[in-house]
């Protein structure tokens, strides 16, 4: 390893010792940690807002003669006689959306499709033939892009689903891009750019003038949204000491879960434009973070910007009311001068210097040439993909929970909080490896059990479903911490970004998994259980990183 690289490694390696002096999670870190958590609330809400803005409301055909133009009742008693549909085992009738029975004109004493006398909307007034309709009765005041741009009926369902596809495509692009840019230009600046870009594109999405513009802004909004949580996570992990890393990652997930659950309040914002504006305008306040939130000290040290790092460390020590040795602070400036001198000597001798902009690629080449790291990261990629497929797959199956859809959605999101708490407990008691494996195996067992009781008691299905969601949520929380602790500092943000990007490809498959139920009803849950089992067993092959220093070089990552 060259002289500047050695100097940088030495400096970064000492940062955990510096934190021990100035406080692993003092007032300085707590204040900045809270600041980076707040935009995560809105990133979480924006990441799932399309579920409501592009959701399909409950509706059926308007039946002239039965439905009053002024007072419409979606669930009127006569609907089953006028509109085809299906009956549940509990006797609940669900009408079809775009078909109605043709009126039997021979039974009418008034003009066809005029308002019939009360009680005349019965089966004898209709034939068995059906016809398409162009006017609809809605089950609630909810207004989405379906009504905005006339996307009712089955032939338009692909348009609603395609919004989700565009969203995940934006996540793929944004996650990879933000991770690379954060490693190259700094965590703070890319973090702020993602927040502002998310807010502006969200506002533009609310102002969309047609379906095409809505798609474009949904894609761009996902690009911005995708960088907020991963970068907040990286900043949080890098600002605290070894004993506080799991706390920093888990508490951040609490904010994410609450942000998702806040979408349940959209029951009070029935218009999709209002909802999108409420989610997009507040994050613009985060422009002030340019002056409030410091850059990651670990990133500054890895880039040989020791003087700037020293200034932040001195400020942190002052706010935390801690003392730090003068000799240690003076060494930052001296090491920076030594690094510059060594780089000049290498250039004079014709030796390839590790320029700042080249270090990321040099680290990637070192990783690519190491079979140990390739095997570890391949296992991590698979586990990330399984997490995404199962997590989003279970979320899509949340409609199996009976009751109000807004309450159900909030419940499914809030169950993630005990999942993250479970991850925190596992991380502290079992270490990273067993915490990840145990969470995945818990999800596996409950998914398989739920698959075999799909026709059983509703409370049992719901309970197993929520436990499965709890397990995969815990796994997702652990995998973020575990992955960050196995990556060298120079590519940590980009590495987590690559893993998260790969997981998004897995998420793209999640909407198709429920279709397997048409062949065998328990198959989706059995598949989720099988995937979780495989991932849980493979995770046991990874090294333990609990209470170990964050690796700052590729060599240190190999030595884990």
Image (tube, helix red, strand yellow):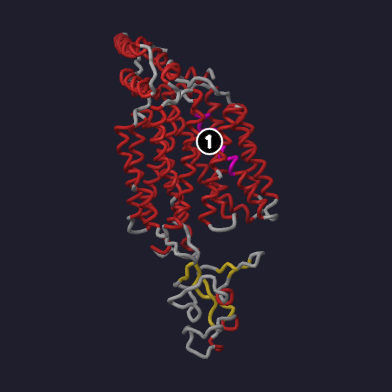
Vertical placement of residue 183 versus 214, above or below: above
> Is residue 471 one of those drawn in magenta?
yes
Which residue lies most toward the bottom here? 109
- Closer to the camera in the image, 404 or 80: 404
User: Could you tell me which quadrant the N terminus lies in?
Assistant: top left
Q: Label 1 neighbourhood size at 10 Å, few (<14), some (14-19), many (20+)?
A: many
* Horizontal side, residue 158 vs residue 415: left or right: left
User: Could you tell me which quadrant the C terminus lies in?
Assistant: top right
Which residue carries the number 1 mark?
477
- Closer to the camera in the image, 28 or 460: 28
Residue 434 placed where, x, y %? Answer: 62, 29
Residue 320 placed where, x, y %? Answer: 39, 23
- Closer to the camera in the image, 84 or 93: 93
* Magenta-colored segment: predominant secondary structure: helix
Which residue lies most toward the front here? 321
Q: What SS does tag 1 mark?
A: helix
Q: Quadrant of residue 345?
A: top left
Range of magenta residues: 469-483
């Amino acid at each position: 390893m060259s002289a500047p690289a050695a100097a940088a490694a030495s400096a970064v390696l000492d940062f955990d010792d510096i934190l021990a002096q100035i406080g692993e999670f003092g007032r300085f870190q707590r204040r900045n940690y809270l600041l980076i958590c707040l935009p995560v609330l809105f990133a979480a809400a924006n990441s799932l807002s399309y579920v409501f803005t592009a959701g399909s409301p409950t509706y059926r055909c308007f039946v002239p003669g039965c439905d009053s133009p002024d007072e419409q009742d979606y669930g009127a008693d006569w609907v089953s006689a006028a509109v085809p549909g299906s009956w549940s085992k509990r006797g609940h009738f669900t009408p079809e959306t775009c078909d109605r029975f043709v009126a039997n004109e021979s039974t009418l004493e008034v003009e066809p499709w005029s308002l019939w006398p009360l009680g005349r909307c019965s089966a004898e007034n209709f034939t068995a033939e059906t016809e398409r309709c162009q006017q609809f009765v809605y089950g609630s005041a909810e207004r989405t892009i379906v009504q905005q741009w006339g996307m009712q009926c089955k032939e338009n369902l692909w348009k609603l689903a395609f919004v989700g596809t565009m969203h995940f495509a934006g996540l793929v692009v944004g996650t990879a891009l933000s991770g690379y840019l954060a490693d190259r230009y700094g965590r703070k600046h890319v973090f702020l750019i993602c927040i502002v870009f998310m807010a502006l594109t969200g506002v533009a999405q609310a102002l969309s003038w047609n379906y095409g513009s809505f798609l474009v802004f949904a894609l761009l909004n996902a690009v911005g949204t995708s960088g907020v949580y991963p970068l907040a996570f990286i900043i949080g992990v890098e600002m605290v000491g070894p004993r506080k890393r799991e706390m920093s990652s888990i508490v951040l997930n609490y904010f994410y879960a609450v942000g998702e659950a806040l979408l349940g309040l959209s029951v009070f914002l029935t218009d999709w434009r209002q909802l999108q504006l409420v989610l997009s305008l507040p994050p613009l306040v985060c422009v002030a973070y340019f002056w409030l939130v410091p850059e990651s000290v670990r990133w500054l040290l890895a880039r040989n910007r020791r003087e700037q790092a020293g200034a932040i460390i001195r400020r942190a020590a002052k706010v935390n009311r801690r003392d730090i040795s003068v000799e240690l602070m003076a060494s930052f400036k001296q090491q920076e001068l030594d690094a510059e001198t060594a780089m000049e000597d290498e250039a004079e001798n014709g030796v390839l210097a590790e320029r700042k902009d080249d270090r990321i690629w040099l680290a990637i080449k070192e990783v690519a040439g190491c079979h140990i790291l390739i095997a570890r990261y391949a296992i991590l990629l698979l586990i990330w993909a399984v997490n995404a497929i199962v997590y989003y797959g279970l979320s899509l199956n949340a409609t199996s929970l009976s009751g109000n859809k807004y309450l159900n959605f909030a419940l499914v999101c809030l169950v993630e909080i005990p999942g993250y708490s479970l991850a925190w407990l596992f991380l502290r008691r079992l270490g990273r490896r067993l915490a990840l494996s145990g969470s995945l195996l818990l999800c596996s067992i409950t998914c398989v059990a739920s698959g075999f009781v799909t026709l059983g008691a509703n409370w049992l299905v719901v309970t197993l479903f929520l436990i499965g969601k709890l397990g995969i949520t815990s796994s997702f929380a652990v995998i973020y911490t575990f992955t960050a602790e196995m990556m060298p500092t120079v590519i940590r943000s980009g590495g987590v970004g690559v893993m998260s990007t790969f997981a998004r490809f897995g998420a793209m498959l999640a909407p198709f998994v429920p279709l397997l139920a048409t062949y065998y009803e328990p198959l989706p849950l059995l598949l989720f259980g099988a995937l979780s089992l495989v991932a849980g067993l493979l995770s046991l092959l990874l090294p333990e990183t609990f209470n170990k220093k964050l690796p700052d070089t590729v060599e240190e990552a190999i030595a884990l």
